[in-house]
Image (cartoon, rainbow, N blue to C red):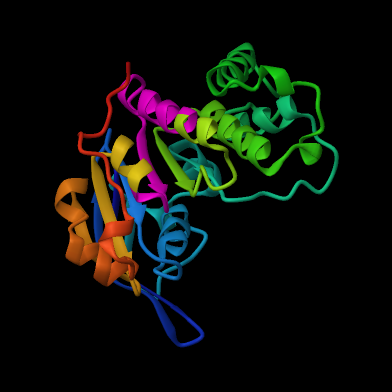
Amino acid sequence: MLELRDVNVEYRDRAVLRSIDLEVRAGERVALLGPNGAGKSTLLRVVTGLVRPATGHVLIDGTPIEELGRDAIARRLAVVPQQATLPFATLVEEVVALGRLPHEDPLRGARPSDKAAVAAAIEQVGLGHLLGRDARELSLGERQLVLLGLAVAQQSPVLLLDEPTVHLDLRHQVDTMELLVDLNERQGLTVLAVLHDLALAASFFPRFVVLDAGRIVADGPPTEVLTQERIRETFRVDPVHVHLPDTTPVPSS
């Protein structure tokens, strides 16, 4: 579904991503991990076409990304950023409805199927109590959930998330992870998420890709990737302070 071949990204003569080879197959649920500055968010921007690599190739479902227009990419990829600025008053339901723009008829506007997709996304993410409110007035955590609702309404086969739990309290972190599992296992979405909480990621994601200094340094199941040596070398912390679950990632109920 997603493939990066020998991708290198530079910024002001500084290497940000180095020789990235990554394949994410359809239906996978992958956590992208690493310390600050490792290149995780840049990798997501490369996948979405917002950052053009200096060398290498990016393919979405076998098609080079440079051959796809923005609408075509949006029909394949839905993105939940860390934060989004709303320049003017917008109701929560209007923000979620933006997810349908890549699908709408430019002349006729929203169809019944688009309205149904928006309603379903609001229900899935649990945004009913926020309807009618200006999204700019919400807390950062509530706004993050609205952005997740927008991505769900988009109904793209691939969901990319950049630290989706960063502004959420513990309950909403778990709720969000369970929703991602449900979208992945029940609806078949391919999920690639940047995460920082190793324990939370290990509870819900069966595959870890770890970046450090712009390179992929580990790729595999959490139990194989998060060795004491890896935690010490990559995350620069004593493994005694990292409490990981003993069980495998939870399936959807």
Q: Is residue 27 left or right of residue 138?
A: left
Residue 191, magenta (yes or no):
yes
Q: Nearer the viewer, residue 96 or 222?
A: 222
Q: Is residue 22 left or right of residue 40?
A: left
Residue 186, magenta (yes or no):
yes
Q: Position of residue 222 (x, y in %)?
A: 21, 47
Residue 221 visible somewhere in the drawing? no
Q: Is residue 200 left or right of residue 94?
A: left
Q: Which of the 4 image quadrants contains residue 28?
A: top left
Q: Which residues are magenta?
A: 175-198
Q: Position of residue 26 (x, y in %)?
A: 27, 36
Q: Residue at x 32, y 26 (%)?
A: 188
Q: Position of residue 253 (x, y in %)?
A: 32, 15
Q: Residue at x 34, y 28 (%)?
A: 184
Q: Is residue 239 left or right of residue 102?
A: left
Q: Residue at x 35, y 75 (%)?
A: 213
Q: Nearer the viewer, residue 21 or 60?
A: 21
